[in-house]
Amino acid sequence: MANFVIQLIGNYGYFGMFLGMVLEAVIIAIPSELILATGGILASQKIFSFEGAFLVGLLGSVFCAIVIYLMGYYGGNAFIKKYGKYFFMKEEDIEKSDSWFKKYGLLSALIGRNFPIIRTLISLPMGITRQSFIKFIIYTTIGSIPWTFAFVYVGYTLGENWIILSTYVGYLKIPIRIFLLSIVFYLFVKKVLKK
């Protein structure tokens, strides 16, 4: 996967980075942190500018969020259940996003953009429930800034040692998944006890 991202950005520059971010939303197996860190590495080598890598990463992230929002807005739950698998959307990940949205509302666009998996799928329930598009864009853009800046900056400072980043991100995903599963379990138990 790393070689594909490096080739894509190496061959197409900023457009390749933007395209990588779009593919990250459609094919969740491509990690955005790798794309953003690669942009940062190229900025450290003066191939990109730091600001350019950051802005392209942010635009790509927001564009993807809009696409997923529109899938939910026009397709609804039925579309997601039927066609979500073709976009590598797992049902349990969609359920996690739904529980985040039910708990935090529009704030989940702000908070959720900084958690792996949730950051990509949090736009679905917002589209399905037809939240204000303008508010969605504002919250998503603000929420995407820390994630985008952090990984571009780490790529910029680590340079060729970006593999270290990839290893640590893998470790970080484990407690985040445990935390998300705990929330889902808590909500499930709460619902059962209510009945």
Image (cartoon, rainbow, N blue to C red):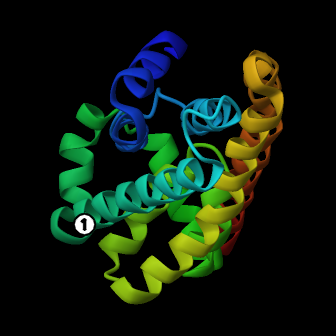
Position of 87 compared to 1: left or right?
Answer: left
Residue found 74% across the figure and 17% down from its top: 160
Residue 12's image quarter? top left
In the image, residue 121 above or below residue 28: below
The residue at the point 75 percent across, 45 percent down is 153
Q: Residues within 10 Å of mark 1 (few under 14, many from 20)?
A: some
Residue 100 in the image: state x and y as whole percent.
Answer: 61, 65
User: Which corner quadrant holds the C terminus?
Assistant: bottom right
Tally the numbered discs. 1
At 74% across and 58% down in the image, what residue appears?
186
Comparing 147 with 99, the one in front is 147
Question: Residue 174, how many percent across, how many down?
Answer: 78, 31
Residue 108 showing in the rendered view: yes
Residue 90, horizontal then vertical, whole percent: 42, 37
In this view of the protein, can residue 90 be seen by the observer? no
Q: Quarter-wise, where is residue 38 in the image?
A: top right
179 shown above or below 73: above
Q: Is 43 positioned to the left or the right of 30 in the image? A: right
Q: Which residue is identified by label 1?
A: 70
Q: Secondary structure at mark 1?
A: helix
Q: Amino acid at mark 1?
A: Leu
**15 relative to 51 in the view: left or right:** left
Q: Position of residue 164 (x, y in %)?
A: 82, 19
Q: Residue at point 57% right, 80% down?
A: 105
